[in-house]
Amino acid sequence: MLISLDDAVARLNQGDLVALPTETVYGLAGLALQAITVRKIFELKGRPSTNPLIVHVNDLSEAENLAKLNDLSKRVCEIFWPGPLTIVLPKKDLIPLEVTAGNQTVALRAPNHPIFREILHRLKQPLAAPSANPSNRTSPTTATHIAELFGDMAPPTVDGGACTVGLESTVLDLTNNKPTILRPGMITRNDLQLALGEEVLLGPHIIQRINKVGQTAGDQSPGMSDCHYAPKTPLFLHAGTKELLESAQLSRKDLIIVCTAEERNVIEQKDFSCLALSISGSEREIARNLYSVLIQADKKKRRRLHLVFSHSPKGLNRAVLDRLTKAAVQSNIQI
């Protein structure tokens, strides 16, 4: 059910859940400081209570009410907020432990979508808002996706159009001596290092996961679960079209996903069904279209999905590969 912005504010004030657009993906929002509302989010998503939520605020001053900020975290917010960057900081007592999965840290973000920001402004309260999808499923980047993913259980939704980023935010841990990326996203390690003038580390689980599907990682922040972002149809990753076409796994009952129109032409010439994530292979276009294409592929009800990703795992490509390796049941990509 689509609702107006005014209706969304009224429902949220009553402790109800509403799906809202952000620049990254649509979020399932509820009042972050009400434990009973937070538990509703976990229940509707089927999300493990060990997986913390991101708390959304309008600006740095609101963040200071919820977490203990130092000079570096203030500088990060001044540079990158509002935008697709989440920071992890020591929490203040105001934040319920239900939000943080029992941790003494909280993940905070100031979204850069006019609808979400207007709602935060009217509520004058922070909102907890993980992606508006059943736990471990593909994240929604349009209002239509939410109805398709939840079916009869779909929450009331404010339609804000297609998300412009298409991947969840970068998560940056600022609780240690060195800023550390816990989840890659649109804001890359290089972006952060250039802006901050200091080294930014990659969480070791990121490289481990890209190199081996199913690598164990803890839930220090949202988005660190091993199985996540997955379509219903089993997804297999491949490093190139040649390797895929020679694979014994490939069947005419399968659907192939590639990154460029050129690759799609190669596959279609072999009489396989194929979808492309982009025309040119642009990193931003691939990221923006990833979830939408996976949801579209799922609806075709094929035996398997095969996705060819031959790009170097750097910059924004690292974020795409992070999502794909969590979604895949098997990867033939070696780094």
Image (spheres, helix red, strand yellow):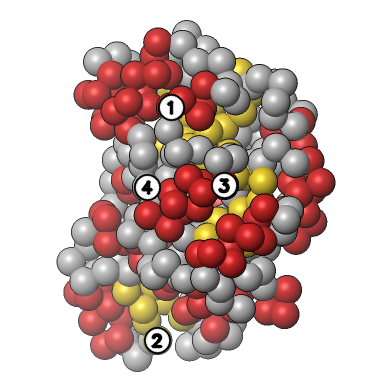
Residue sitting at x 27%, y 62%: 285
Q: Can the viewer see residue 327?
A: no
The amino acid marked with disc number 1 is Leu
According to the picture, the residue beneath numbered tag 1 turns out to be: 60
Residue 158 or 164: which is nearer the viewer?
Answer: 158
Q: Residues within 10 Å of mark 4 (few under 14, many from 20)?
A: some
Q: Residues within 10 Å of mark 1 (few under 14, many from 20)?
A: many
Q: Secondary structure at mark 1?
A: helix
User: In the rendered structure, are the residues bearing label 1 and label 2 in contact, judged by CB atoms less than 8 Å apart?
Assistant: no
Residue 133 image-quadrant placement: bottom right
Q: Could you say where residue 164 lies in the image, as x and y percent from the top left?
A: 33, 59
Please tell me which of labels 1 and 4 falls first in the chain. 1
Please tell me which of labels 2 and 4 falls first in the chain. 4
Q: Which mark is residue 273?
A: 2
Q: Residues within 10 Å of mark 3 (few under 14, many from 20)?
A: some
In this rendering, the answer to whether 238 lies above or below 301 is above
Spatial distance from mark 1 to mark 4, Cα to Cα? 13 Å
Q: Which mark is residue 129?
A: none
Spatial distance from mark 3 to mark 4, Cα to Cα? 17 Å
Spatial distance from mark 2 to mark 4, Cα to Cα? 37 Å
The amino acid marked with disc number 3 is Leu
The amino acid marked with disc number 2 is Ser
Please tell me which of labels 3 and 4 falls first in the chain. 4
Please tell me which of labels 2 and 3 falls first in the chain. 3
Q: Which mark is residue 123?
A: 3
Spatial distance from mark 1 to mark 2, Cα to Cα? 48 Å
According to the picture, the residue beneath numbered tag 4 turns out to be: 112
Spatial distance from mark 2 to mark 3, Cα to Cα? 47 Å
Q: Secondary structure at mark 2?
A: strand
Residue sitting at x 56%, y 76%: 2
Image quadrant where one finds the C terminus? top left
